[in-house]
């Protein structure tokens, strides 16, 4: 049993990244932040501000509960008759995009983007055959170099041997980090 306790968090480690990605895509930190500093909102209040007329509140509650369990959000229940209310923590405040010079939401989206994750599926080929995982995935060796308005994000992976600035079109959800395309030859 003790061995499984070590193994299963490794197997399921991706879940936290994708729940975090979901929070950013749904703009949950921004919705709560708009309520005011240190304010909390119920699931219904948050759902009413999402960009959909058919929000599944029970699924939203599950996402919020996971975020609370990981200490990314906080929750309170003022009394037995009240609904749970969700608020920001110092960590989730880093994901607020509005008026936040320390905004880390684009980093979450970048590192959970399918274009970034795809080469990891080829890591075994890197070990077995010496193939470059990125080249196996995309047909060329590239180094990710993205610029944002106030930070430079780069990937120093030693498997990368050439440089190419990615186009925003190559990332399904992380265009905020990408400001220009420049290919270095």
Image (cartoon, grey):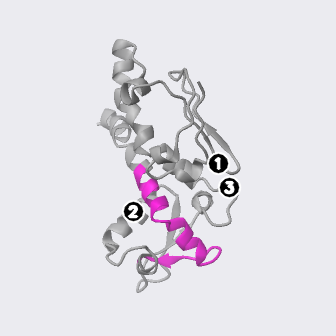
Residue nearer the viewer, 160 or 95: 160
Residue nearer the viewer, 64 or 162: 162
- For residue 102, which numbered disc appears in the image? 3
Q: Earlier along the polypeptide chain: callout 2 or callout 1?
A: 2
x then y, percent, for residue 109: 49, 50
Q: Earlier along the polypeptide chain: callout 3 or callout 2?
A: 2
Mark 1, other Cα within 10 Å: few <14 / some 14–19 / many ≥20 = some
Left or right position of 120 against 156? left
The answer to whether marks 3 and 2 mark residues whose Cβ atoms lie closer than 8 Å is: no
Q: Secondary structure at mark 3?
A: loop
Q: Earlier along the polypeptide chain: callout 1 or callout 3?
A: 3
Q: Secondary structure at mark 2?
A: helix
Q: Quadrant of residue 156?
A: top right
Magenta part mainly helix, strand or loop? helix
Q: Residue at x 31, y 76 (%)?
A: 54
x then y, percent, for residue 172: 43, 50
Image quarter hosting the N terminus: top left
In the displayed structure, 103 sits above or below 10; it is below
- For residue 148, which numbered disc appears in the image? 1
Q: Is residue 28 magenta?
A: yes
Mark 3, other Cα within 10 Å: few <14 / some 14–19 / many ≥20 = few
Q: Secondary structure at mark 1?
A: loop
Mark 2, other Cα within 10 Å: few <14 / some 14–19 / many ≥20 = some
- For residue 171, which numbered disc appears in the image? none
Which of labels 2 and 1 is toward the front? 1
x then y, percent, for residue 6: 37, 35
Report the residue marked by disc 2: 63
Which of labels 1 and 3 is toward the front? 1
Query: What is the distance, in whole Å, between disc 1 and disc 3 at their CAs?
Result: 12 Å
In the displayed structure, 3 sits above or below 85; it is above
Tell me the magenta residue range. 18-43
Q: Quadrant of residue 51?
A: bottom left
């Amino acid at each position: 049993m003790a061995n499984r306790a070590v193994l299963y968090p490794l197997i399921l480690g991706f879940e936290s990244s994708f729940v975090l990605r979901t929070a950013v895509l749904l703009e949950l930190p921004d919705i709560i932040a708009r309520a005011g500093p240190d304010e909390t909102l119920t699931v219904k209040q948050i759902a009413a501000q999402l960009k959909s007329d058919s929000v599944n509140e029970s699924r939203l509650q599950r996402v919020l509960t996971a975020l609370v369990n990981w200490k990314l959000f906080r929750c309170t229940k003022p009394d037995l008759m009240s609904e749970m209310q969700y608020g920001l923590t110092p960590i989730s405040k880093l994901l607020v995009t509005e008026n936040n010079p320390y905004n880390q939401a684009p980093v979450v989206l970048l590192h959970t983007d399918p274009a970034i994750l795809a080469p990891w599926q080829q890591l075994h080929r890197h070990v077995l055959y010496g193939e470059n995982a990125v080249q196996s995935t995309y047909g060329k060796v590239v180094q990710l170099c993205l610029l944002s308005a106030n930070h430079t994000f780069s990937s120093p992976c030693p498997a990368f041997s050439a440089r190419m600035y990615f186009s925003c079109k190559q990332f399904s959800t992380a265009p905020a980090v990408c400001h220009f395309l420049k290919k270095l030859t």
